[in-house]
Amino acid sequence: MQSYWKVKLSIFLNYFVFAILLNSVGTVILQVQSTYNVSETSASILEAFKDLSIAGVSFLIASYINRLGYKNAMLVALGFNALICLLMPSIHSFGMTKVVFAVAGAGFALIKVSVYGTIGLVTADKKEHISLMNFIESFFMVGILAGYFLFSGFIDDSTPTAWLKVYYLLGGIALVAFILLLSTPLDESSLKIDTAKPFTDDFAEMFRLMILPLVLVFVICAFTYVLIEQSIMSWLPTFNSKVLHLPNALSIQMASLLAIATALGRFLAGVLLKKLNWLFVLTGCLVISAALVLVALPLAQNAATSGVTGWGNAPLAAFIFPMIGLFLAPIYPAINSLILSSLPVKKHGLMSGLIVIFSALGGTTGSLITGYVFEHYGGQTAFYFSLIPIGLLILVLILFSRLQGKNATVEISSVGGH
């Protein structure tokens, strides 16, 4: 197994570059508005190109990944993304930006399914498997944080297209990961390929699963949660810029506080949910999230924002509002863990497919609604709107609890995001 360090390094680089690409959507939404003179509503469509390609490819590839092979699937994803990133600065346009996110979404779907399978091939035992899985998921969060500062570092207000040069760096990282993986043998002979089972069987079974009351209510929970999370995450840089009137580079950097708060929230949740009733913790988190909206937005309205040059003189609202990530963070991993632990192990693969699909649809819906409200009613109203799905999610979680049964605790072994 001495050569597997190359595969592992490639996996880390894969997750790093895709974390930056996928979670740069908020930054890019802000930048395309000025670079290509597009409206908030038009810019919000970028979320759909990212999420719908993730959902579509995840659904299609689940049945055929063993036939294609993990290594081949990852090479395809890395190759296409390296090419698109390297082309982006020279043939840039709003249309090309849509292509970047569509290719990134499709690539991530291939990467995620393949990486989860590859971990089992390159680890010797369960302990090593869990360790590598947690390192990889943690590195995804590192990529998200790095992305805010990488993009902001390339922004130059005097050169509207300067930020596009960051894609040369991202394309280069993807290319390094591609070469590392290509040059490393990966034994996939242990994969079992069922060539007789038609794709339509998996399709039908997935939707038979969805009509179970518990699964149906879960799907509404997942959809609503991601709608809230993505509407805030994707539009926070624009909120910082247009409502708090911060410089674009600073608006993007300060949005990183949301990612930091989310990472901390998921870490703390892993401890709390082992000791406390999950419904109590999650509803409490949602109530506090709603309270933060009601505290931070009036502060933003009354903030003195003239002459802001850096973190030191940024308004208090720019620090308070991202803390919502601390309290929203535990919800998604917890409900995923609850639904999977309520189903037979053989159904976990199909349930994972439903999680990916409805999470992607929720993210797209949240961004589109927020973009429309932002443009027509302003940023304050757009973020106040999050109170509606927060209230709905509390009600649906209570219903989910009643269907799922009175489990006092839930153990979450991995707290990686979606």
Image: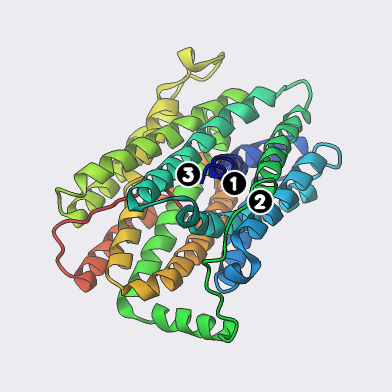
Q: Secondary structure at mark 1?
A: helix
Look at the numbered discs 2 and 1 and tell me whether their residues touch, using CB distance below 8 Å.
yes
Tell me which residue sits at (54%, 26%) in the image.
253
* Residue located beneath label 3 in the image: 232
Is residue 364 visible in this depiction of the protein?
Answer: no
**Label placed on residue 401:** none
* Horizontal relation, residue 228 to residue 401: left or right: right
Q: Earlier in the sequence, mark 2 or mark 3?
A: 2
Give the alpha-carbon distance from disc 2 to disc 1, as whole Å: 7 Å
- Position of residue 150 relative to residue 203, above or below, is above
Name which of mark 2 and mark 1 comes first in the sequence. Answer: 1
Disc 3: CA contacts within 10 A as few (<14), some (14-19) or many (>=20) = many
Q: Nearer the viewer, residue 202 or 365?
A: 202
Give the camera-side residue of 61 and 298.
Answer: 61
Element assignment for label 3? helix
Q: Earlier in the sequence, mark 3 or mark 1?
A: 1
- Kind of residue at disc 3: Ile
Residue 3 in view (yes/no): yes
- Which of label 2 and label 3 is nearer to you? 2
Question: Cα distance, mark 2 to mark 3?
Answer: 21 Å
| Point 14% across, 66% down: residue | 406
| Amino acid marked by disc 1 | Leu
Q: Which mark is residue 104?
A: 2
Identify the colour scheme used. rainbow
Q: In percent of the image, x 79 and y 51: which residue is there?
A: 95
Does 262 sit above or below residue 49?
A: above
Query: Disc 1 marks which residue?
Result: 22
Where is residue 200 drawn, in percent x and y? 57, 85
| Amino acid at circle 2 | Ala
The percent coordinates of residue 376 (x first, y second) are 59, 48
Q: Quick one: SS at disc 2?
A: helix
